[in-house]
Image (tube, rainbow, N blue to C red):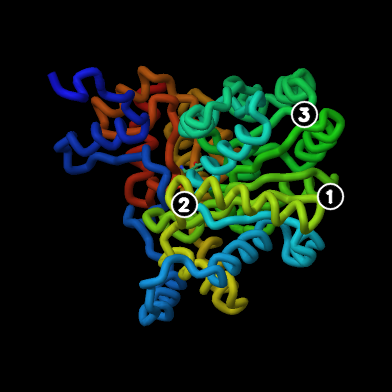
């Protein structure tokens, strides 16, 4: 008998299961539409030019010391400006607590732990559906998760009425996780007007909005535009928490760079909250790695470099938007009996296609096209070369 006889395999991660099936398929023209990572029109991963430039600039730096306070403060400040607004009083007056985090996942994980520590009996409401890891993250922090209505399968858009009902019926002072743009997995975002109504109701109910910002720039191509939901909540004077990831918009997936920030009433509260966040991260992994933090700081701190990076974000988002239009047109040209407007109505990296599980299975078996069972298509993996084949296959399984 060994120490670990009682350990059985954990449930397979949904996305990894798709990747495994894709890798095991010997077909030379197989396509993986499962992974939510940006690809260029050749289907290749992209290293952004300004990340390369920044790499060159920090190449000679001596990284023997762990994260320097100066570099992490810069990262936090510039990250906060990116989502909350450059000239915001909260930032100028340092009324926010922020720490660098291990990408978006790490930021969510630290917040979940913080929530548990200071609101031990609280729950968190997730949109239905949401990124599958949200449940794991808050679950591991022992914060029970609930859901609120979000997606409407008929319209393949937002179920706004049911969403508002759920916000209204949740106990006052509940925690809500919101995707401010490019919702994963549905690509469905509320309009500005709907965000205003959500924000007003949150105010009445005294709910806490926690924004998970994993795709800033990917919905509209403009990082400022994509922060609009957060800005609307700011105007209404909410206390806000944000998990920010630079995995997608800087293409830094493996570097794990992110930021967790919480807006506070005053500087004293900010200092207290920051020290608590640091204590939690210290116990988990001491400090994040310095290389990625230095890269992001280099880009965000230099207005010229930042402007050029923002152009690259625009290029990525525009390519995805073009592929949405092309895929929809191709399906319409094939005289598909179904309505595919939602492909262009939805925004960001993903299209929630409405394909059933059986259709998804058929796409894999007969056409070697892989995606998650919920029918989510990573539009970033659709290219000029494969779009017609993808459209024909979708048409075949749905006609
Ligand atoms: N939130 C959402 C909604 C996501 O889709 C992702 C990435 N799939 C993340 C957070 C976290 O990503 P990362 O930890 O790689 O930054």
Quadrant where the C terminus lies?
A: top left
The label on residue 173 is: 3
Q: Nearer the viewer, mark 1 or mark 2?
A: 2
Tell whether 17 sits left or right of 3: right
The reply to whether dot 3 and dot 1 touch (C-beta < 8 Å) is: no
Residue drawn at x 62%, y 53% is: 275
For label 3, count other residues whose C-alpha is less than 10 Å away and answer few (under 14), some (14-19) or many (20+): some
Q: Alpha-carbon distance for marks 3 and 1?
A: 19 Å
- Residue 32 screen position, x and y as percent: 31, 40
Residue 349 x %, y %: 49, 45
- Residue at 53%, 26% in the rendered image: 142
Residue 235 numbered mark, or none: 1
Q: Is residue 74 above or below residue 105?
A: below
The residue to which callout 2 is attached is 102
Of tags 3 and 1, the one toward the viewer is 3
Picture quadrant of residue 207: top right
Residue at x 32%, y 56% (from the top left corner):
44
Element class at badge 1: helix
Q: Is residue 194 visible?
A: yes
Q: Disc 1 to disc 2, how far (Cα)?
A: 29 Å
- The quadrant where residue 303 appears: bottom right
* Residue beneath the point at 71% across and 38% down: 209
| Label 2 within 8 A of ligand 1 by Cβ | yes
Q: Position of residue 292 (x, y in %)?
A: 43, 64
Q: Ligand 1 within 8 A of label 1's CB?
A: no
Q: Residues within 10 Å of mark 1 (few under 14, many from 20)?
A: few
Classify mark 2: residues with Cα within 10 Å, few (<14), some (14-19) or many (20+): many
């Amino acid at each position: 008998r060994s120490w670990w006889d009682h350990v059985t395999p954990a449930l397979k991660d949904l996305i990894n299961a798709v990747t495994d099936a894709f890798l095991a398929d010997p077909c030379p023209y197989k396509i993986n539409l499962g992974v939510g990572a940006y690809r260029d029109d050749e289907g290749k991963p992209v290293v952004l030019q300004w990340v390369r430039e920044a790499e060159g600039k920090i190449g000679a730096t001596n990284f023997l010391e762990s994260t320097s306070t100066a570099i992490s403060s810069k990262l936090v400040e510039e990250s906060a400006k990116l989502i909350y607004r450059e000239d915001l009083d909260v930032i100028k007056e340092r009324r926010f607590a922020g720490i660098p985090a291990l990408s978006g996942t790490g930021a969510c994980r630290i917040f979940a732990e913080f929530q548990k520590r200071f609101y031990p009996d609280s729950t968190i409401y997730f949109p239905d559906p949401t990124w599958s890891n949200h449940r794991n993250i808050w679950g591991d922090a022992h914060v029970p998760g609930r859901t609120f209505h979000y997606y409407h399968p008929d319209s393949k858009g937002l179920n706004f009425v049911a969403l508002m009902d759920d916000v209204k019926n949740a106990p006052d002072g509940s925690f809500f996780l919101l995707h401010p743009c490019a919702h994963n997995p549905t690509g469905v975002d509320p309009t500005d007007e709907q965000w205003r109504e959500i924000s007003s109701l949150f105010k009445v109910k005294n709910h806490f909005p926690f924004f998970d910002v994993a795709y800033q720039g990917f919905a509209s191509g403009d990082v400022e535009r994509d922060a609009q939901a957060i800005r609307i909540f700011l105007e209404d004077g909410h206390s806000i928490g944000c998990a920010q990831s630079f995995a997608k918009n800087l293409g830094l997936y493996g570097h794990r760079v992110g930021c967790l920030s919480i807006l506070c009433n005053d500087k004293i509260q900010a200092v207290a909250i920051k020290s608590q966040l640091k204590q939690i991260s210290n116990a988990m992994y001491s400090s994040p790695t310095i290389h990625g933090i230095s890269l992001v700081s280099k880009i965000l701190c230099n207005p010229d470099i930042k402007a050029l990076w923002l152009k690259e974000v625009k290029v990525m988002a525009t390519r995805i938007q073009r592929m949405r239009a092309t895929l929809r047109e191709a399906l319409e040209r094939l005289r598909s009996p179904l309505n595919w407007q939602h492909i262009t109505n939805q925004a960001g990296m993903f299209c929630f296609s409405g394909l059933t599980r059986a259709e998804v299975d058929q796409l894999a078996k007969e056409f070697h096209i892989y995606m998650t069972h919920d029918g989510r298509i990573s539009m970033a993996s659709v290219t000029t070369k494969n779009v017609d084949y993808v459209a024909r296959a979708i048409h075949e399984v749905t006609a």
